[in-house]
Image: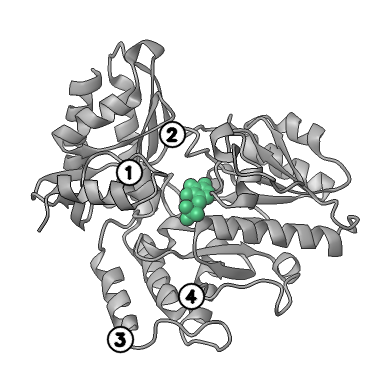
Amino acid sequence: MPSSKEIIETTEKYGAHNYHPLPVVIAKAEGAWVWDCEGKKYLDFLSAYSAVNQGHCHPAIIQALKDQADLVTLTSRAFHNDQLGSFLEQVCKLADMQMALPMNTGAEAVETAVKAVRKWGYTKKQVADDQAEIICCNDNFHGRTTTVISFSSEEQYRQGFGPLTPGFKLIPFGDASALENAIGPNTVAFLVEPIQGEAGVVVPPEGYLKQVREICDRHNVLLVLDEIQTGLGRTGKMFCYQHDGIKPDVLVLGKAISGGVLPVSVVLSSNEVLGVFNPGDHGSTFGGCPLGAAVAGTALNVLIEEKLAERASDLGGRFKDKLQGLTSGKVELVRGKGLLLAVVLKETAGGAREYCEQLMEKGLLCKETHHNIIRFAPPLVIDEKDLDWAFTLIKEILG
Ligand SMILES: *Cc1c(COP(=O)(O)O)cnc(C)c1O
């Protein structure tokens, strides 16, 4: 077997350089732990950006994958398959929604939500052709396709990739009155993350979502929540919006819906909104495939049976307290909910990347977001003693 160093060289030589990974090569994983090619063990504190909430290679999910792989993996939606209906029913009941549309990646699900709310605007809100407007927030992250980057405020995400898709307006995150002011007659939807994960785990002010819900209702604007990262137990509730006692009109899920095994995403909404799609309007060859449906159905069962949302709430609450108790000249602040946490470093502390590299050396895999923020998001199945061990390492580096 080639060494980690050789594998990195081959990857860098033949792969486009659209990522800057830490120099670790993972060859095996189980639960919250991963191993490199030389057999060194690391605690995973990123969980593939919250896609492996259920832990790596969860035995029940892998069994569902193997069992379904022996039967049928892909039919396309030209035919029915025996797995999709029950999976859609399960996810609709979980989110208290009427209808779901399955896709693969998160960005595709966001694209699907954009198409759904635009068509809803034209057919139900009587917005004039091609005039529909969607409001989004500064520092959002919703994926990397051309339309989705069209409403990014991150210069690097857009630069060189134009012409961009029109029809989006940006407002500050966490400012409900900015939403009220931005809404016009052609506004069909407000698309927002309950907590901005990629922006550095930015939590909006208390009561924000409640105000946003009320404003959207008053103006007949659909509230679309992107819970691709915050959903499915991560923040200590099954869905992050449950902290605020509201419900969105459209919910976008991805990542952990398959426990990190396959790309599965869904858009959930009412019959009125998703009913705008007629045969031929939209589709995906792999979206809704029996393999994805079987795996995702099992991955949702694992979240429920193992009470992973409660676990995220308990463990995350205690871990956040510990981080906040750190007396450190390097930490500006600690923020987040459940097991979606971040440490914001002081200007004087230097870049977050170097701390991530030091933590990697010690056996803890974290990833910086922006130059001064480190996100802590382990699999929700992590043992409390492993979290304690991680804290001692973090204390050594940042304390
Ligand atoms: C990861 C992510 C996406 C994009 O998902 P992909 O599967 O990478 O396309 C969209 N929105 C949020 C909030 C995310 O965290």
Any atom of ligand 1 within 8 Å of the CB at mark 3? no
Mark 3 or mark 1, which is nearer the start of the sequence?
Answer: 1
Mark 4 or mark 2, which is nearer the start of the sequence?
Answer: 4
Front residue of this view, candidates 115 and 94:
115
- Marks 2 and 4 in Cβ contact (< 8 Å): no
The answer for how far apart the CA atoms under marks 4 and 1 are is: 27 Å
Q: Is residue 228 visible?
A: no
Residue at which label 3 appears: 70
Residue at which label 2 appears: 336
Residue 217: x and y, percent? Answer: 78, 48
- Marks 3 and 2 in Cβ contact (< 8 Å): no
The amino acid marked with disc number 2 is Gly
Mark 4 or mark 3, which is nearer the start of the sequence?
Answer: 3
The answer for how far apart the CA atoms under marks 1 and 3 are is: 31 Å
Check disc 1: other Cα within 10 Å, few if <14, some if 14-19, many if 20+.
many
Q: In which quadrant of the rendered view does residue 316 lie?
A: top left
In the displayed structure image, the side of residue 185 where residue 364 appears, left or right: left
The quadrant in which the C terminus is found is top left
Q: In which quadrant of the rendered view does residue 271 lie?
A: bottom right
Which residue sits at x=50%, y=79%? 84
Nearer to us of marks 1 and 2 is 1
The answer for how far apart the CA atoms under marks 3 and 4 are is: 19 Å
Nearer to us of marks 3 and 2 is 3
The amino acid marked with disc number 1 is Leu
Q: In which quadrant of the rendered view does residue 125 lie?
A: bottom right
Residue 225: x and y, percent? Answer: 61, 50
The quadrant in which the N terminus is found is bottom left
The answer for how far apart the CA atoms under marks 1 and 2 are is: 14 Å
By what rule are the colours in the image chosen?
one colour
Mark 1 or mark 4, which is nearer the start of the sequence?
Answer: 1
Residue 174: x and y, percent? Answer: 63, 31
